Each structure stands twice: as structure tokens, then as C-alpha cells.
Amino acid sequence: MYYNEETVIFYNGEFIKAKDASANLYSQSLHYGNGVFEGIRAYNTPEGTKIFKSYEHYKRLKYGAEVMNIQLDYSEEQLTQITYELLQRNGLKDAYIRPLVTTGSDMSLLTSKETNSVIQCWEWGKYMGDKLLRVKTSSFQRPNPKSCFVEAKVTGHYANSILSTNEAKNNGYDEALLLDMNGNVAECSGANVFMEKDGKLYTPPRGHIMAGITRATVIDLCKEEGIFVEEKHFTLEELKNSDACFFTGTAAEVVGLQSLDDYQFPLAWEKSHGYKLMKLYKDEVLGLRQTSKAS
Ligand code: PMP
């Protein structure tokens, strides 16, 4: 699914076939989760293939590398240019792009000086599908922001996302919703959350969550479209008293919720702000909006 005989990746400065690449079994990233990655999408727009918010994604990758002391010498512009070339070499117009920076052989707990940078891409539909999601509140919380840099996409942090997704799916649900250490609603295992109540939208503020690029795009869209949106903490009880709810993320895009545990969201999805934003987001990434800021 991710690659075939012909797939090209960018690996340590070169474009090579994915099948010819080898990974280091002594890598600190494999043993301890000290690596950083991104999840980006490119869209086939009327003006050709456009990587959506490439600069913002690579800025976050560089931020993650910096806080983890991982050396990453490429600029956001260089990484963007390399990614466009990679898409072209793979003949991909619509694609999911996965840059990953791993560390070298070192079994100490100090960041290895050696780094490996790889960019992979493949065709990938909407990660959580198009159906409304049946979500389970996770028994796992998002990490304490004093235990790690929650806004960095560090590979090791995703053990928490895997635990919560396994738990939700093993119990017959589609996805997990995680609370923060204070009991407030935080986010999904790989997406941010918005709640609609009485025509207004609310989303948890930064601090315990990934600062999602889709979340920021949706907030901008709300401001442009005159939809009230506020970043504020809310509890599970408030969410289970709300009208509608949706998740946002690069892989998931904008996807609505049908239910949370036993609670069915009462507002029809098609009548909710989430539905409207799902369509506006699609137009935004395709560069079809006049005010489009797609980069
Ligand atoms: N939260 C988590 C935990 C994530 O992994 C992601 C995906 N990066 C998001 C939210 C959504 O972020 P973005 O919109 O930048 O993809």
C-alpha cells in the first residue's frame, strides 16, 4: 500500500527507490522513540499539485527537531522544494507526505549526533473515512505538557495515540477522544476537536494538544465566514450536552461525529457548522476560495 517496486523516496540527500533503502536497527528512534515526523497533504488543484501549508508543516518539523536536539539542516523552503520534486518523481498529484527524521546508533539517552532524514509519499484517502464517527472516551489521557513537548510531533509520543486507538477499536468504536491531565477535553488520537453549542464553536486552547494546522485553518475559515469560534477548555459533560462535534487533521481533514460513548449528537450533521467547514476546507486546500491562503 505504501510503496511498490517503483516508489521513490528522498533519503539522506538523495532520491532513491524505497525498495533499496535500509533502516538502522540500532537507531535511537527505534529503541526510544526519539525521532520527529510530519503528516502533510498535496492536492491536485486546478493550478496543478499544491502542497497545503507546506511551510507550516516543515516549521513544526524543525521545531520538533530543535526541542529534541535532533540536527536538521534543511530550511522549510528546501524541504518544500524537495517534496515537490519527490511528488513529481512518483507521478503523484494527490498525496499524503510523511517526512521523518530519525537519530543514529546510540543506546545512551542523549540525542545521537547522527540523523537520517527521509520523505515518503503515497496516495491516501481521508484517514477516518467519510462516515460519521462513533467515538469512545479514552481511559488514557494526553501527556502532561511538563513531561514532553506536546506540540512536537515526536515519534515516541504516538504510543499514547496507539494505546487509545487500540482501546477504542477493540471496543467496537471508530476513534478515541482523550482528556487532558485536568479532565478537560483535549483531542482525538491524531486530530483536534471542535464542539458546536447553540450555533457557536469551541475548541480546546493550546497547551495540552497538538497545535493542528487544520485546526488553525478551520479557525481562520470561521473568522472569514462569520462563524463564532472560541478557544476555551470544556469538560466531557459539556461535550455530551452539545449539539454537534467534529475532528480536524491533515489526514482526517474535517470529519463529523455521530456519537460519543452513549451520547448521540442531536444536530443533523448536514445542518452543523462542521459540515459547512468540511466543504470550505476542501475548497481551501484546492485553492478554490478567493481568499485562499493555500501555499
Ligand atoms: N492532534 C494530534 C495528536 C495529531 O497527531 C495531529 C496530526 N498531526 C493533529 C492533532 C492534527 O494536526 P494537523 O491538523 O496539523 O494535521
Image (cartoon, helix red, strand yellow):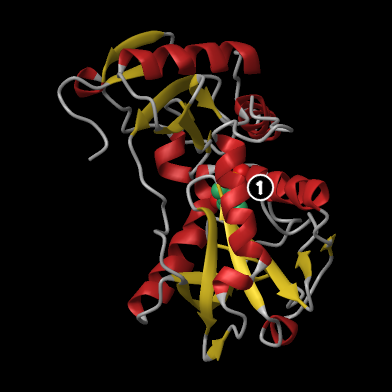
Residue 92 is left or right of residue 156, and the answer is left
| Residue 174 drawn at (x, y percent) | 41, 71
Q: Quadrant of the C terminus?
A: top right
Instruction: Please identify the residue farthest to the bottom as the structure is shown.
Output: 262
Residue at 60% over, 86% down: 266
| Residue 34 drawn at (x, y percent) | 53, 39
Residue 60, by quadrant, is top right
Observer able to see residue 11: no
Observer able to see residue 84: yes
Q: Quadrant of the N terminus?
A: top left
Crowdedness of circle 1 by 10 Å Cα count: few (<14), some, many (20+)?
Answer: many
Residue at 46% over, 71% down: 133
Residue at 73% over, 47% down: 221
Q: Cβ of disc 1 within 8 Å of ligand 1?
A: yes
Between 76 and 274, the one nearer to me in the picture: 274
Q: What amino acid type is highlighted by mark number 1?
A: Gly
Instruction: Please identify the residue farthest to the top as the structure is shown.
Output: 14
| Residue 207 drawn at (x, y percent) | 79, 56
Between 148 and 199, the one nearer to me in the picture: 199
User: In terms of secondary structure, where does tag 1 sit?
Assistant: loop
Instruction: Find disc 1 in the rendering and name its residue.
Output: 212
Tag count: 1
Residue 21 is left or right of residue 197, and the answer is left
Residue 22 is left or right of residue 76, and the answer is left
